[in-house]
Amino acid sequence: MAASKEWQKMVNGELYWAWDADLQANRDRCKEACDNFNQAGKVSRRRRVELWREIIGDTRPLPPVHPDPKTDEEQFKDTDPVVDPPISVDHGLNFKVGKGSFLNFNTLVLDTCLITIGERVLFGPNVCLYGATHPLDPAVRRGLEGPEAGKEIHIEDDVWIGGSAIILAGVRVGKGSTVGAGSVVTKDVPPFHFVAGNPARVIRRIETTMDPDNKETT
């Protein structure tokens, strides 16, 4: 997959042909993996992690099964996020989520380019990460006949994204920040700030001992 010419153009943020056979095959793979994850019903943490890793193409071996279910579940605390179904991911292979993070139901991810979520990040329901873009010029865009593109999205550690927020392509949400519910984030969010609105704007700085630049809390 990584050797495909169109795949390389896509992850590099260049214009690419979305209907390339290799890209289509991976989207089909990811859709099937998402369907399996979403339709699994009530399953063990181990099985949920296994299904999650199939979405993102994580081939690490699972730890040996522990006979005690609670102890077995604890083995995944520092290795994988908690993800509530349903989830919809476009490619999966470009989506990285850190340990201790929680993605609430109806998360939607267009991972044309790399999308990263740090550790201890919290998502409300219905959060959308739109890493895909189209040319603004309709003469270039040409509906289904033209090329597509994308930009990376990075959400750093200890961020809280409120329900129904939308994060657009090219955005970085800084460490320890909060995005208000229903916001549309069109530009970078500085670390330890609260943003809200459409388009999202800085409301205030967050006072916290985690902020190395906030001398009042040290």
Image (spheres, rainbow, N blue to C red):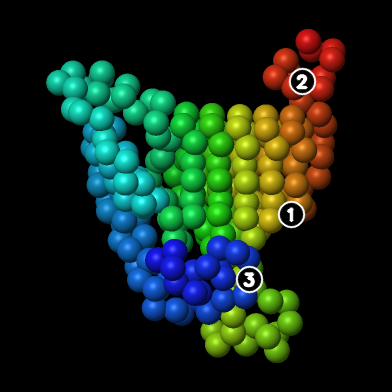
Among all residues in the image, which is located at the extreme left? Answer: 67
Among all residues in the image, which is located at the extreme top? Answer: 218
Locate residue 91, reporting x and y percent. 44, 61
Residue linked to disc 3: 14
Locate residue 212, reporting x and y percent. 77, 20
Which one is earlier in the sequence, the residue at label 2 or at label 1? 1
From where the camera sits, is residue 1 visible? yes
Residue linked to disc 2: 212
Q: Residue at x 38, y 25 (%)?
A: 77
Secondary structure beneath label 2: loop
Residue 216 is drawn in which quadrant?
top right
> What is the number of the mark on residue 39?
none
Left or right: residue 64 compared with residue 167: left
Query: Do the residues bearing badges 3 and 2 touch, measured as CB atoms within 8 Å?
Result: no
From where the camera sits, is residue 48 visible? no
Could you tell me how far apart the alpha carbons at marks 3 and 1 are, in whole angstroms? 20 Å
Which one is earlier in the sequence, the residue at label 3 or at label 1? 3
Secondary structure beneath label 1: loop
Residues 145 and 152: in front is: 152
Q: Residue at x 53, y 60 (%)?
A: 110
Label 3 neighbourhood size at 10 Å, few (<14), some (14-19), many (20+)? some
Left or right: residue 44 compared with residue 202: left
Residues 176 and 103: in front is: 176
Could you tell me how far apart the alpha carbons at marks 3 and 2 are, in whole angstroms? 37 Å
Residue linked to disc 1: 186
Query: Do the residues bearing badges 2 and 1 touch, measured as CB atoms within 8 Å?
Result: no
Label 1 neighbourhood size at 10 Å, few (<14), some (14-19), many (20+)? some
Which one is earlier in the sequence, the residue at label 3 or at label 2? 3
Could you tell me how far apart the alpha carbons at marks 2 and 1 are, in whole angstroms? 26 Å
Query: In what quadrant of the picture does the N terminus appear?
Result: bottom left
Query: Identity of the amino acid at label 2?
Result: Pro
Secondary structure beneath label 3: loop
